[in-house]
Image (cartoon, rainbow, N blue to C red):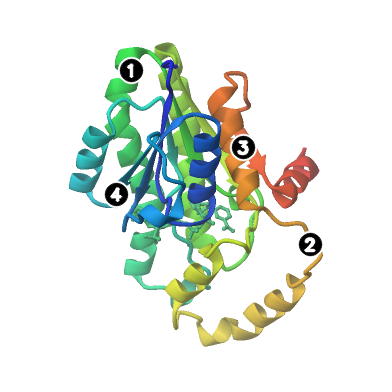
C-alpha cells in the first residue's frame, strides 16, 4: 500500500458509500468519492478528497473516472439498487436494471482498476453484497440473484488475484432502514406487485415490522470495509451490522 493510500468508492451520494468516505477521510486516506450526480456539500472540505462523476452502468463514465482518479489502493464496489416485489409482476427491463448496476457495474469497475493494481502487485477490491446471499428472503429473488452473482464472482476472483498480491473481499450488510435504499427499492418496484401476492406481501410486512429488531447502521458497513481493507488477514466475507452478524452466527 502506498504511503498515502487512496480508496475509490462507488455510490457515495448516500448511505453506506457516504459513511465509508467519511471514515476513510477521518483516518487520513485520500478518498475518491464517486457519485452519479456529484455533490460537494455532502462531505467535509478536504485536500484529501476528490469527488468524481461515475455511473457504473456506463463504460465511458468508468474509463473517464478511473483515469481521473489515478492510482487506487482500494476499490469499494458499493453502488447498488434494490427491487422488492414478487417475480411474477416484474418486467425483463426491471430485472436487467438490477443486474446492470449490481453485477455488471461491479465487474466493469473491477476490470478497470485491475491493470494498475496488478502492475503494483498490490490492491484490495471490496464488493458490497448483502445477507440475502446467505439468508434467503421472499420478494427479493432478483436482488438476491444479483448479490449471489457478486459473491460467486468475488470468491473466484480472489483466487486468481492472490498470486498478484491483490485481495478481494465481500462485506455483507443486513437490513439498514436508515439509508434510502429500501424506499428506492420499493419505488423501483412501482406497480409490480402482482395481485395474487398482495395478501402474502401484507402478512410479510406485519411479520417483519418489529421496531426492536437489530438492524445495520451505515457506520457498521464503513467499519467492515475498513477492516477488510486494512487487515490482510480479514476473512473473505464480513457480515456488517448486528442483524447480519446474528444471522451469520446462527448459520455457523
Ligand atoms: N440498505 C440496505 O438495507 C442494504 C442491505 C444490504 C446490502 N445493501 C447494499 O449496500 C449498497 C449500498 O446501499 P445503501 O443502503 O447505502 O443504499 P443507498 O443509500 O440507496 O445508496 C446506493 C448508492 O448507489 C448509487 N447508485 C445507484 N445506481 C448507480 C449507478 N448506476 N452508478 C453509480 N452509482 C449508482 C446511488 O446513487 P444515486 O443517488 O445516484 O441513486 C447511491 O449513491 C448497495 O449495494 C446495496 O445493495 C443495502
Circle nearer the N terminus (1, 4): 4
Left or right? Give the position of 184 relative to 40. right
The crowd level at tag 4 (other Cα within 10 Å; few <14, some 14-19, many 20+) is many
Q: Nearer the viewer, mark 1 or mark 4?
A: 4
Estimate how packed mark 1 is, as few (under 14), some (14 to 19) or many (20 or more) residues with alpha carbons within 10 Å. Answer: some
Residue marked by disc 2: 213
- Does dot 2 land on a helix, a strand or a loop? loop
Q: Earlier in the sequence, mark 2 or mark 4?
A: 4
Q: Secondary structure at mark 4?
A: loop
Label placed on residue 54: 4
Residue that sits furthest to the bottom in the current view: 195
Kindly indicate the quadrant of the structure image that contains residue 49: top left
- Asked whether mark 4 and ligand 1 are closer than 8 Å, the reply comes as yes
- Residues marked 3 and 2 touching at CB (< 8 Å): no
List x then y, in percent, for residue 147.
50, 49
User: What residue is shown at x 23% (from left), y 36% (from top)?
Assistant: 68
Count of marks overlaid on the render: 4
Label 4 with label 3: CB-CB less than 8 Å: no
**How far apart, in angstroms, are the residues tagged by discs 2 and 4?**
35 Å
Residue 166 in percent (x, y) is at 43, 20
- The quadrant in which the N terminus is found is top left
Q: Nearer the viewer, residue 54 or 25?
A: 25
The answer for how far apart the CA atoms under marks 4 and 3 are is 23 Å
Q: Are marks 1 and 4 in contact (CB under 8 Å)?
A: no
Q: Which residue is mark 3?
A: 224
Find the distance from the CA under tag 3 to the CA under tag 2: 21 Å
Decide if residue 7 is on the left or right side of residue 52. Answer: right
Residue 27's x, y, as percent?
55, 31
Q: CA distance from mark 2 to mark 1?
A: 43 Å
Q: Which mark is residue 118?
A: 1
In terms of sequence position, does the residue under pointer 1 or pointer 3 come before the other? 1
Q: Quadrant of the C terminus?
A: top right
Amino acid at each position: 500500500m502506498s504511503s498515502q493510500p487512496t480508496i475509490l468508492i462507488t455510490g457515495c451520494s448516500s448511505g453506506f458509500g457516504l459513511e465509508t468516505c467519511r471514515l476513510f477521510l477521518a483516518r487520513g486516506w485520500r478518498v475518491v468519492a464517486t457519485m452519479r450526480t456529484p455533490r460537494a456539500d455532502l462531505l467535509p472540505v478536504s485536500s484529501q478528497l476528490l469527488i468524481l462523476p461515475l455511473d457504473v452502468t456506463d463504460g465511458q463514465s468508468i474509463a473517464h473516472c478511473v483515469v481521473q482518479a489515478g492510482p487506487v489502493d482500494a476499490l469499494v464496489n458499493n453502488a447498488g439498487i434494490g427491487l422488492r416485489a414478487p417475480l411474477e409482476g416484474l418486467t425483463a427491463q426491471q430485472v436487467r436494471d438490477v443486474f446492470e448496476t449490481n453485477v455488471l457495474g461491479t465487474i466493469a469497475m473491477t476490470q478497470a482498476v485491475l491493470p494498475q493494481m496488478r502492475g503494483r502487485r498490490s490492491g484490495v477490491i471490496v464488493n458490497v453484497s448483502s445477507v440475502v446471499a446467505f439468508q434467503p428472503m421472499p420478494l427479493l429473488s432478483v436482488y438476491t440473484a444479483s448479490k449471489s452473482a457478486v459473491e460467486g464472482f468475488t470468491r473466484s476472483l480472489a483466487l486468481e488475484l492472490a498470486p498478484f498480491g491483490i485481495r478481494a473481499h465481500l462485506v455483507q450488510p443486513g437490513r439498514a432502514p436508515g439509508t434510502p435504499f429500501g424506499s428506492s427499492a420499493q419505488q423501483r418496484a412501482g406497480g409490480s406487485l402482482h395481485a395474487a401476492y398482495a395478501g402474502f406481501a401484507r402478512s410479510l410486512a406485519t411479520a417483519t415490522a418489529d421496531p426492536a429488531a437489530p438492524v445495520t447502521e451505515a457506520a457498521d458497513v464503513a467499519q467492515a470495509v475498513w477492516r477488510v481493507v486494512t487487515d490482510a488477514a480479514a476473512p473473505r466475507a464480513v457480515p456488517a451490522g448486528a442483524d447480519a452478524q446474528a444471522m451469520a452466527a446462527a448459520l455457523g
